[in-house]
Image (cartoon, helix red, strand yellow):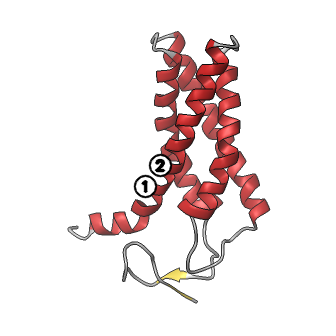
Amino acid sequence: MEDFPRRLWAQFGPQAVKFCVVGGTGQIFGSTILYSLTEFLHVYYIYSNWVAAVVTQIAAFTGYKYWAFKLNTTRAAYSTGTQFIIHWLVWGVGLGIATLILYALTEYAHIWYLYSSWIATVVSATSNFLSHKFFTYKPEKTLKPIGIKNPIQPHYES
């Protein structure tokens, strides 16, 4: 049991930190778009949020694929095109969840729409991270982990 935190970090830690850096950067940029569209152009906040989300996900795909979920020791199970499609499907589910949370917090809890969008992002980020890690950007199935020699980079054998 004392080995559990180390194994948990090795399995999720570095990628989770990178995922949060990419997502956090996107959230800052997306919040700027959301606020600008809503306050200056008077676009309904839900629509503004969707526009901001689409714009940020275009950059996020690149950040996730080539940095957060980069496979150093093996090939990906899917081609880039397939990963792109899966990424958008996973993201679409996350956007649906985030939109419901955004609407509920803004309309019923009377929280400012910008704060609501941040809360919604944090809630949907966990499911998005796990879906991307184990589905979108997973390694080829023919390779299996052979223990933890370096907790930052797992080693694989054929």
Q: Does residue 68 appear to the left or right of 53 in the view shown?
A: left
Q: Does residue 28 appear to the left or right of 91 in the view shown?
A: left
* Image quadrant in which you'd find residue 76: bottom right
Residue topped by disc 1: 17
Q: Is residue 144 above or below residue 122?
A: below
Q: Which mark is residue 36?
A: none
Q: Is residue 109 above or below residue 68?
A: above
**Which is more toward the observer, 69 or 139?**
69
Q: Residue at x 70, y 38 (%)?
A: 55
User: Whole-percent x and y of residue 50?
Assistant: 68, 29
Q: Residue at x 34, y 69 (%)?
A: 7
Task: Specify few, some or many for label 1: CA neighbours under 10 Å numbering under 14, 14-19, or 20 or more.
Answer: few
- Image quadrant for the C terminus? bottom right
Dot 2: what SS? helix
- Image quadrant for the N terminus? bottom left
Q: Residue at x 70, y 21 (%)?
A: 47
**Which is more toward the observer, 67 or 105?**
67
User: Whole-percent x and y of residue 91?
Assistant: 65, 43
Q: Are marks 1 and 2 in contact (CB under 8 Å)?
A: yes
Amino acid at pointer 2: Cys
Q: Which mark is residue 20?
A: 2
User: Whole-percent x and y of residue 40?
Assistant: 65, 13
Q: Residue at x 57, y 41 (%)?
A: 26
Q: Please identify the residue farthest to the right as the structure is shown.
A: 81
Residues at marks 1 and 2, CA–CA distance in whole angstroms? 5 Å
User: Whole-percent x and y of residue 51?
Assistant: 71, 29
Q: Please identify the residue farthest to the bottom as the structure is shown.
A: 158
Dot 1: what SS? helix
Amino acid at pointer 1: Val
